[in-house]
Image: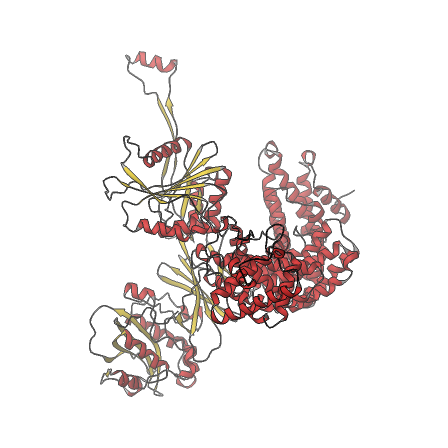
Amino acid sequence: MDRWEYVKDSELFSVYIISLVEHVNGYSKLLYGLGYPINGEVPKDKLFNYTISNNGPGKLQVNRLTCFLTGDKLKIFLDKMEEGKNLQTIAGELEIELDKKLTEELKGLHLKTKDYRHRPPVFLENKESVNYYKLEPIASLASNPVICESIINIEKEKVIDFDDGGYEQYDVMEFIKDTLKEEFSFKIPGPDIKRLGNFEVFSYPFVSSKDVKPLTTKVIKESEGYCLTGVKVNIRPGKFKNNVYLRCRTRNGQVIIGDQLKFVKCAETAQEITFPINEPCSDIEVTVWDASEIDNQPIKLLYEYRVPLMRSLSFDMGLIGLRGKLEDKWTKKLEKKSGGQKVNKKVERISRENFQIGGFDKDPWVPAGSELNRLFRYYFPEKSKAQFFSKGWQDENSFVKWFQDIIGKHKTKEVIIIDPYFDDEAVSKFLALAKYSDITYKVMTDIGFRDSNIEDNIINGCKQAEPMLPPNVEVHGLFRKNRGTDQIFHDRFVILFSENQLEQVYLLSNSLSGVAKNHPSVAVPVPDNVSHDIVEYYLKLFNQCEAEGIPKVEVKLLWPQKKDSASTRGKKVSENGVEEFPGFLELTKVLFDSKEIPLDQIGDDYKLQIAEKEQIRCKQFERLGKNIYYYLNYDKDKALKLWCGIANWVVRISDNDREKIFNWLNELDYREALTKVTKSCILESIEREFPIGVQNLKCNNENISIARNSFLPFTNMGEFAKSMLEYHFGRYHSIYSVSMAFEYLLSYNPEEAIDVLTRVIEKAKEKEGTVPTVDLAPCYIVISNCLNELSTKLSADMIRNDFRFLRIGLQAEADVIRALSAAAISSYIVEGQRKLSDYGNEWVEALYYLDCLKEPMEKVHSLAWVAYECQVLRNQKNDGSPLNDTMEHIKKKTVELWPEEFEDNTEFRLIMKKFSGPIEGSYSKDLCDVLKQLVESNKVSAEMVGDYIIKVLKEKISTHLEDGDKYYPPVDSVFTYNVILCFCEISPQKASELEGVLNTLINQSKRVLIRPFIKTRKYEKWKNSIETLCWCGTALLWLDNENNNVKETYLNIYSLLQQYVDDFDDSCGLYNMFKKEGEYVGYLIK
């Protein structure tokens, strides 16, 4: 971002420069500079000086220099300051008058260019200062990007001699802070310097051009009271480079209550950082700063993310539960005795929920999204099928997915969208993505009360998104007959009609317009008795029925239903009776001297063939090469059209004939020209229309899915790469110019193929999240087709035992290319284990190709993918000794390649899961073997392994206790035994922690069993608790059967279980295991 983006030349800025002067040694130091826009006329350019305070420790004095500058002078002023010029020199060059009171120290005030990166900004400009004409920096001297540098940097430059001058750092800091607080409206949180430490190296904020989040945050809360205890920040891999500073700032209202700063090494890898929160807060801000050592450059703000919090929402809701009349013989007698007076026979029973709006000072602050979600789920229970979307309707991963889900379940044939604010963004970012089967979409919107250009807005939106729109779409604009501007309707509805014409109506809290795209919204199903009335009303309105209560309107069709797509055009036949294809005329014009096509080149199926005679064939190939070379130099469009003809020709002939054409052209002097035209075709197809490009072709969900998966980091691509190799999606005949171009490059110039695909991926990746999906559709189509060709080649190479391309693929810059190459090796090895007689030991050679990967963790992940597939093969009863040898080799190589000082718990578990196969915990001997070797080789700490075992074991047992039927007898009993033995060997110091976790689970299970009349409830309600007690009790014995506390706990469990043994179905064998282990250690008598 341009640093002066928000500074306009004609605007007036008020400029403050704060300096610290020490009269003992005569030094002066720039502390802080600020320039912000103000309203008013430009006064005389003059630099004034005010002594703010001289009551500091010793003889320290704080001065403020003030002047007013227009934007153009402001820029020059700062540039000259950064060049190291003093104020007197700058004033002379800019014709700024200096105040007579200015001392020589202040006139000579300047920045030292050699140490600029440790300096604060002289002026700060940002969007907020422009919008509100003010800027109120926070005077947190420890770590704030818009305030003066800290004492540690002052000491570094020896502006103040703390050793000889008798100054105390904290006293000086408090003096400066108090002085600035009196001078400006700073918001001081308190004694932050002692809590936060001395730190200040940041400068100009940097606004990222991407909306794709490079990190995620998760608020940690106590189980009771919702009090915040911390925030967990996960840095996604590949988003940042080198080292960064990560800062977590907490606020309560507008006041900063805490800043925490951590230095993060190797930020390009996935990392998890937790910041503790000890005080109530209303706002959490996470910022990332570049920590690269670059001379004479300010440190940039790379990313910032705020988590808004809110106090618990509440409101009063009164519900009448019962209402009726009471009449019996007793009431009739009362009426007779009372002279015929009617007795009040009305009965009401009212249930009321008392919940006040707003919160109180002592209420905890919780994340706004989760609190609203909880609130809606409370008052709209899950059975109501209401859905809350905290990120708004434009969150494609939630709203559109939910929409497609409900229309699928409802067997919908027609969808009517009623939205008075419908616009072009609703077309491109909802309709274009929400297509489902052959459903008809109709939109009713109110255009009478909006701007006159709304019709063109919607129509243009439909035109741009046409390649991605569903086949049947109608957009209707309604306006009053008298052309009045009164709004016709306000509510937003989605109406679904099923095959039997039954309707389902949903009320939307927000419009689908672009204005409301990111606002939290809720979709609430309307009860059947009301939905019928809604449908009837709007159908009458649409059909312009003259009925009471129905406005008189006119309906205008803004977008027609009929569509014409390039992919649906019929086949054409030339004058010679040969089937034509894109680029046919350009191709035949080059191949043949006359318009006549020789009969021997017309096949039985009326398709163009290569010449049978070698002499004629070579002559024609020579013409192709020469013309491609000539057109590239003088008419690139013709070169691309000719290639389009060649590509669409070679896919219609045999593979053998195709190889003849490409081999001939590649062996002569036309290799460079053919490489150039194929690369140009791939790159320019994004901007060109059919038949050369893909601009006007339909982009389906599979294109989008494949392309977006290619943006993932390498470590998350295992499943995607495997599915691409196993299930190639269908070819598209209309874009052979792209697919054949990439196939040629892969076969004859693979380095160029990798380069061009990487460029397309990077181009799309940069725009992802910043532009509508429809704008990226051409990139998605090109990427998905090229990846299909790459997957086809890798699969074919592995079948032929051809490893030549692997080295190039594994060294590619694009993560997806490396991932596909690594997955191909995994597929090859596993297939080799299935067919041992055919492959022999060639899998070892393939495995060593993974060393071509540059990043150690990528090698480890690739080995884990192989391990996963081997475990799957074992599950298929193919557990032979060669497979065991393969696993031993993989384990050994994994430990060998594992980087030292590894600390990422999340990534660690992700890798360890792969060694278990589909079910976490399977083949636990392999898992424990890897864990032991990693600890023994000092690659992973014993504490991390211990934490991992505790976490996995706790999750397994907790899941079974809560959900039931989650215990796998062949897996979990063996897993529990093996990991506890491994745990005792590796992390015996954490035994008490594991024992505490098991005791907590035991107590949770006991609380269920000691409830009154528990046996009268369903068997499933207490079965899980008994099984959990058996599981945990056995685990305790394996952990430490010599511990008296363990013995006491075990016998207590055994005594409790005796009350339920007769009614308990030990289908999992847990009670039997529990009892046998007790007998084995002597706790029970056989």
**Image point (67%, 39%), residue name:** 1057
Number of disc labels: 0
Is residue 333 depicted above or below 1034 in this figure?
A: above
Q: Is residue 184 above or below residue 707?
A: below
The one of 784 and 899 positioned closer to us in this rendering? 784
Q: Which of 142 and 813 lies nearest the eye of the viewer?
A: 813
Q: Is residue 933 left or right of residue 362?
A: right
Viewer-proximal residue, 59 or 328? 328
Please state the horizontal and vertical placement of residue 599, each as a whole percent of the image. 61, 55
Q: Position of residue 826 (x, y in %)?
A: 68, 59
Q: Position of residue 1024 (x, y in %)?
A: 63, 41
Find residue 718 and report its horizontal and vertical position in percent: 61, 57
Asked if 351 appears above or below 1033 in the picture, the reply is above
In the image, is residue 278 above or below residue 164?
Answer: above
Image quarter in which the C terminus is found: top right
In which quadrant of the rendered view does residue 943 lie? Answer: bottom right
- Residue at (68%, 57%) from the top-left corner? 827
Q: Is residue 247 left or right of residue 338?
A: right
Specify whether 45 is left or right of 513. Answer: left
Residue 272 seen in render: no
Q: Is residue 204 visible?
A: yes
Image quadrant in which the N terminus is located: bottom left
